[in-house]
Amino acid sequence: MALPDTRTKILDAAERLFAEHGYSGTSVRAITDLAGVNLAAVGYHFGSKAELLAAVARRVTEPITAAQNAGLDELLARTPDPSVAELVEAFAGPFFDEMPAANESGARTSRLIVTILSDPAEEARSWTGPDEDMVRERYLAAFARAVPGLAPEELGFRMRGILAVTAVDRVEVYNRPSPGCPTEMAGEEARRLAITFLTAAMSAPPTQTWR
């Protein structure tokens, strides 16, 4: 089995530390110490700590983004106006598929997403690339047709809620599995409950409070 190269070592170490301590709480030196590489290696391979965060985030979200895109393609091939429930399943389902709560890797990905969502650093809010932005815009347009009358701000808020609920759930199921119930089963039940809850949340009438 080939040993990971320097770039992969840095990405692995950064993913672990960013998930545990956030962007501001993680130093480049801590990353290179954990990776066992030279301090200058981050600059050589990524350019900056901010670009390293972007690379880490994209690496873990690429499978999710691809599945979301494929799911929406499949829905739109059947009907130009999918239901809210179908859109929620296509958008949220990949989080459960790609972040299995039964293992540390899935839980770490979930913690990383939760950390990025809650980190006040500007770098934690500007990592997305064209692929992530394209999928987000496609779902915003589809949800806007399925739930007419929602202000763009409220629709964006609700979609961020989908991300937050699924990521937090993956961490919680891993950390505290149900007594007497395998983590995989708890995850399946959590998926069903989450999709039902999120469908109701996305279907709710406009709050009429946005300006």
Image (cartoon, grey):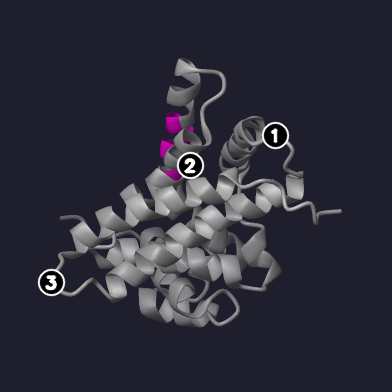
Q: Residue 188: x percent and y percent?
A: 26, 53
Label 1 amino acid? Pro
Left or right relative to 50: residue 1: left
Tag 1: Cα neighbours inside 10 Å, few (<14), some, or many (≥20)? few
Span of residues in magenta: 64-71
The amino acid sitting under disc 3 is: Gly
Q: Which residue is painted at 61% across and 73% down in the image?
A: 119
Numbered label attached to residue 125:
none
As drawn, the label of residue 88 is 2
Q: Are marks 3 and 1 in contact (CB under 8 Å)?
A: no
Q: Which residue shows up at 44% across the image and 37% down it? A: 90
Q: Secondary structure at mark 1?
A: loop
Residue 74 found in image quarter: top left
CB contact under 8 Å: marks 1 and 2: no
Tell me, for residue 148, which label it has, or none.
Answer: 1
Residue sitting at x 15%, y 67%? 181
Asked whether 118 or 180 is in front, the reply is 180
N-terminal of the pair, mark 1 or mark 2, is 2
Does any portion of residue 48 appear in the rendered image? no
- Mark 3 crowd level (few <14, some 14–19, many ≥20, 10 Å Cα): few
Q: Is residue 64 visible?
A: yes
**Separation of marks 3 and 1 at Cα, in angstroms:** 44 Å
